[in-house]
Image: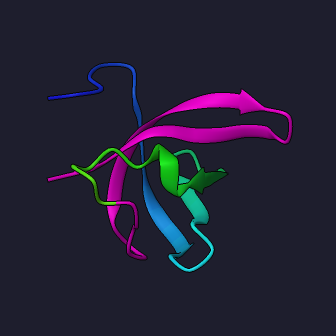
Amino acid sequence: MPGGNGQQRGEVKWFNPNKGFGFILTDKGEELFVHFKAVQNGGRRSLRTGTKVRFDTRMSDRGEQADNVYIEQ
């Protein structure tokens, strides 16, 4: 299972596949930006609203964002 321990969990708040980005609502109640390049599900580069995910975070020039995003199975 890629990713592994230390990843956070959350739910996709919304994702616009045409623009390639959206937001994840973390289990801690925070909203994190997610870009399609961060989605790691076998070539799938989109997320559906309400989908449970696990992810790492990283700092960008615009603040903290989701990285290495995997759909919970």
| Span of residues in magenta | 45-73
Q: Number of marks in the image?
A: 0
Where does residue 70 sit, x and y in percent of width and height? 31, 45
Q: Name the residue rendered at 54%, 58% in the picture.
A: 24
Where does residue 12 sit, x and y in percent of width and height? 46, 65
The colour scheme is rainbow
Q: In front: 38, or 66?
A: 38
Position of 22 relative to 65 (above/below): below
Q: Quadrant of the N terminus?
A: top left
Asked whether residue 11 is drawn in magenta, I would say no
Position of 39 relative to 1 (above/below): below
Q: Name the residue rendered at 26%, 50% in the picture.
A: 41
Q: Is residue 72 left or right of residue 67?
A: left
> Residue 40 lies in what quarter of the image?
top left
Q: In front: 40, or 30?
A: 40
Q: Name the residue rendered at 65%, 50% in the picture.
A: 30
* Extreme residue toward the right, this view: 61
Where does residue 21 sit, x and y in percent of width and height? 60, 64
Chief secondary structure of the magenta span? strand
Where does residue 19 sit, x and y in percent of width and height? 63, 74
Asked whether residue 63 is drawn in magenta, I would say yes
> Residue 69 lies in what quarter of the image?
top left
Q: Is residue 56 left or right of residue 53?
A: right
Q: Is residue 2 left or right of residue 69?
A: left
